[in-house]
Image: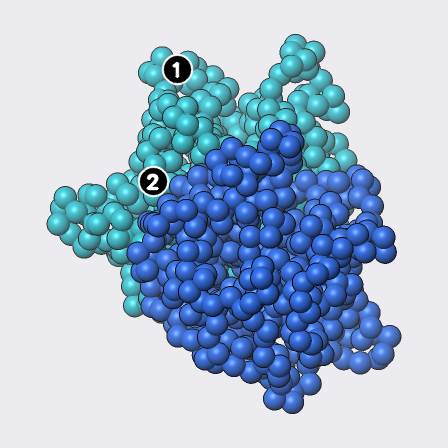
Chain colours: A cyan, B blue
């Protein structure tokens, strides 16, 4: 019989794992535009101080407050499942386990950080949160979290997604959030862009600018980010901590741990607890998987760069394709981000992770095989992890080695079926960044300080 | 902390419960159009004999074959959860437990019978299955099951849904099924209707006729039905059997058991194992919930009637609004069926169930409260069960009694957000059948034999 390990709600981890306590090389600080380090106080108009404290903390284990556990327990611990039918179809000497993050109300791992962020803002006395969203996974998750903590929520959604993805927008409405198309006429950043181009399709960078601008202007409002930052990575470690317990129940330990990477929070969630083992000498291959169309980790230099297009955020030390880089149009909207979390960038530099990139059609092929064997339809983002699993399984077969693979099945694709339609109709091609496009994107990085390697 | 009881995959029930073994009054047989009972052999062109045997069996416990358990274990046992936040919002003296059937790949309870039906057809040597679908829940579930057992699958989808619900159609395509709009030019039944009305929007009744017609004409093809029939009810009892074990773990026994009813399979799933207790003298209120717009159980007479509009199926002894009755347009497409399972009809006659009906807007109001407290967005069908939970909770408060309520959360509403949109925009009104409409629908029942009460 298929193995599926569920833990009782009372077995949910009571602490997040903060990898900042164990980094072989500490993170370089975020910088202001003048090149001086950003202090916690400077972030106070953007985030509540309790979250800023988490952002800079080096305490290894941070207790998860009871009200957060109460809500996470509505779907956590998420099941750890073995993909027996997919294994059989691959016919390679591997066991494949996955952590099913699709069981959350929003259908992905995003609520793991949306709930704590809403909670910390709430107890800090904040009344409203602003955020940006691309395809809508993050915006809908934060909308849900705000509904649960009785906070107002305003989501700036990239206009092209706003127009093309009415259903994510409706999810936000069901959860009571206000969702508006970005660029909007409601912010200075939005107005300036609309003046230049009234039909601007928007971008994640622009939407971040608008959300941050609105947050800093109102005393009762803060901004919330769904990836990239240290505290977001930490909130997601609940995935990997649960997985370790569940694997232990099975008497298993993975040879390979895989997650897809946009900003990096899903990957950090499954991987960081295993990176801790690796730092302590355990042998485990840890693979962040990204699109070849947006090869931040595999082709982007390590540099100080802005988190948003307009340059309103601090400069972060990270692998980046340049904050003005517009990722090529692939269906995995959640992986179309120019940078990657500083924590993940640091671990790559320290050779604890081995990033790989994948073509979109290989990802859809893997996802279709998954759907027809395991039943569940993966999100386009998740399909990148599945493509990496397929690659590792084939490698194991070539090498004649038996391997145990663990990956984060970051979310279901029920709201993203149009991409499958395009794939099945043969309309998708494999897009890869040319060297010229890469160089062009990196131009905007010139003139900023180099972070210590 | 929220209570959430997960069972290990090895704790999945190994037997289905067949309530035919315990009925206080046995079922009257299905009849042919000439009024004589249908024999199993007469059904052989439509269903494989191993399923027909289940349909007529009175064996109490039927073992679930290992290959079926292997697949169901990919998401079963489904979690039993306590709706602590919803309870708090209601402020009534009730504990509310629910069985989350939304965790299946198709997002509802339907795969619980799709998997066994595909399996039994496969081992019987069948190569293709045909079926009908309205909004697409059943069609997508059978498509998935067929993908897993390497069967071809052809789904006749009611044209109006086919045109309005592209995403359910895409799910079926991902799972490799052929989905065509009904009425179609590919069957005699479809052609006749298209000749009269080339723009016919279709109906479930027409789609059944087409699917059955195609099945009986090809030796390698059989038909599959997602509700109403005895074997379908039985396959769903896995829901209630798991729930009983999970409630026992918590030391709980429900005072009230609730499920929504279209054809009745979801309700049968949660309720029949508790009806067994009730037959043995245990006190438990068991409430099937239906829309006031399609009040089969609460206003339909018990009669012999066809399962489809065209009258191709046997006559079944059931509560019915008449096979020519076209249910009023509500968003809960899965509850828009003129009849209800003979087994449920029988239990209603024997006063073991107390059906209730609900207005659509009350259901959406309950569903919105659910989404904003528990997070999960319920299917429009499921919202009828939630409305019944709200009614029972208020009743408990009025009576000053503490009660434990258990219900089947039959599926999520992520593919049905348009209904929420209409509700939030105030576009929905409460539709109720007038006495005239009821009488008109019942006219087609005249002239058929009366089943024994």
Left or right: A187 in relation to B186? right
Give the position of the C terminus of chain A as an image quadrant: top left
Chain that bears disc 1:
A
Element at label 1 = helix
Q: Is A240 above or below relative to B243?
A: above
Question: Is residue A34 or residue B161 the one in the foreground?
Answer: B161
| Badge 1: residue crowd in 10 Å (few <14, some 14–19, many ≥20) | few
Q: In which quarter of the image is residue A25?
A: top left
Measuring 38% from the left and 35% from the top, which residue is drawn there?
A364
Q: In which quarter of the image is residue B97?
A: bottom right
Q: Is B386 above or below relative to A438?
A: below
1 vs 2, front mark: 2
Q: Give how far across and how far down residue A99 sits, in percent.
A: 42, 55
Question: Is residue B60 or residue B283 the one in the foreground?
Answer: B60
Identify the residue at the far bottom of this view: B281
Q: Is A50 above or below relative to A341?
A: below
Question: Is residue B181 or residue A130 the one in the foreground?
Answer: B181
Measuring 41% from the left and 27% from the top, which residue is drawn there?
A425
| Badge 2: residue crowd in 10 Å (few <14, some 14–19, many ≥20) | many
* Residue holding disc 2: A366
**1 or 2: tag closer to the N-terminus:** 2
Measuring 46% from the left and 75% from the top, which residue is drawn there?
B57
Q: Give how far across and how far down residue A138 sits, in percent.
A: 58, 41
Element at label 2 = helix
Q: Give how far across and how far down residue A153 sits, in percent.
A: 71, 41
Mark 1 vs mark 2, CA separation in Å = 28 Å
Give the position of the N terminus of chain A as an image quadrant: bottom left
What numbered label is drawn on residue A437?
A: 1
* Residue B417 in sight: yes
Q: Give how far across and how far down residue B372 sits, in percent.
A: 71, 53
């Amino acid at each position: 019989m298929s193995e599926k390990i569920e833990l009782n709600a009372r077995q949910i981890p009571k602490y997040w794992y903060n990898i900042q306590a164990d980094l072989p090389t500490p993170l370089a600080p975020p910088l202001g535009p003048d090149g001086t380090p950003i202090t916690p106080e400077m972030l106070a108009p953007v985030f509540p101080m309790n979250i800023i404290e988490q952002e800079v903390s080096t305490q290894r284990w941070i207790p998860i407050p009871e009200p957060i556990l109460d809500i996470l327990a509505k779907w956590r611990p998420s099941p750890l499942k073995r993909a027996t039918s997919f294994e059989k179809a691959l016919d390679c000497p591997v066991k494949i386990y996955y952590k099913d993050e699709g069981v959350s109300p929003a259908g992905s791992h995003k609520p793991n950080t949306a709930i704590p962020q809403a909670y910390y803002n709430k107890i800090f006395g904040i009344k409203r949160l602003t955020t940006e969203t691309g395809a809508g996974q993050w915006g809908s998750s934060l909308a849900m979290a705000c509904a649960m903590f009785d906070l107002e929520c305003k989501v700036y959604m990239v206009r092209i997604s706003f127009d093309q993805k009415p259903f994510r927008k409706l999810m936000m409405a069901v959860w009571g959030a206000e969702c508006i198309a970005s660029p909007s006429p409601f912010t200075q950043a939005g107005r300036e862009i609309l003046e230049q181009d009234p039909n601007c399709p928007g971008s994640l960078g622009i939407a971040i600018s608008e959300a941050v601008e609105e947050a800093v202007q109102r005393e009762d409002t803060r901004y919330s980010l769904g990836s990239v930052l240290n505290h977001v990575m930490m909130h997601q470690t609940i995935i990997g901590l649960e997985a370790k317990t569940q694997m232990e129940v099975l008497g298993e330990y993975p040879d390979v741990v895989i997650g897809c990477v946009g900003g990096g929070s899903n990957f950090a969630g499954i991987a960081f607890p295993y990176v801790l083992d690796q730092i302590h000498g355990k042998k485990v291959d840890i693979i962040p998987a990204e699109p070849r169309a947006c090869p931040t980790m595999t082709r982007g230099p390590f540099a100080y760069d802005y988190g948003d297009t307009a340059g309103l955020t601090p400069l972060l030390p990270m692998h980046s394709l340049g904050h003005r880089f517009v990722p090529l149009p692939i269906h995995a909207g959640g992986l179309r981000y120019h940078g990657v979390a500083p924590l993940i960038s640091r671990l790559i530099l320290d050779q604890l992770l081995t990033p790989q990139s994948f073509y979109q059609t290989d990802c859809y092929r893997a996802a279709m095989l998954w759907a027809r064997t395991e039943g569940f339809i993966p999100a386009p983002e998740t399909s990148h992890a599945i493509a990496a699993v397929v690659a590792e399984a084939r490698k194991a077969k070539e090498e004649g080695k038996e391997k145990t693979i663990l990956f984060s099945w970051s979310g279901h694709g029920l709201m993203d079926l149009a991409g499958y339609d395009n794939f099945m109709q043969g309309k998708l091609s494999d897009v890869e960044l040319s060297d010229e496009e890469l160089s062009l994107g990196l131009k905007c990085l010139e003139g900023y300080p180099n972070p210590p390697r």
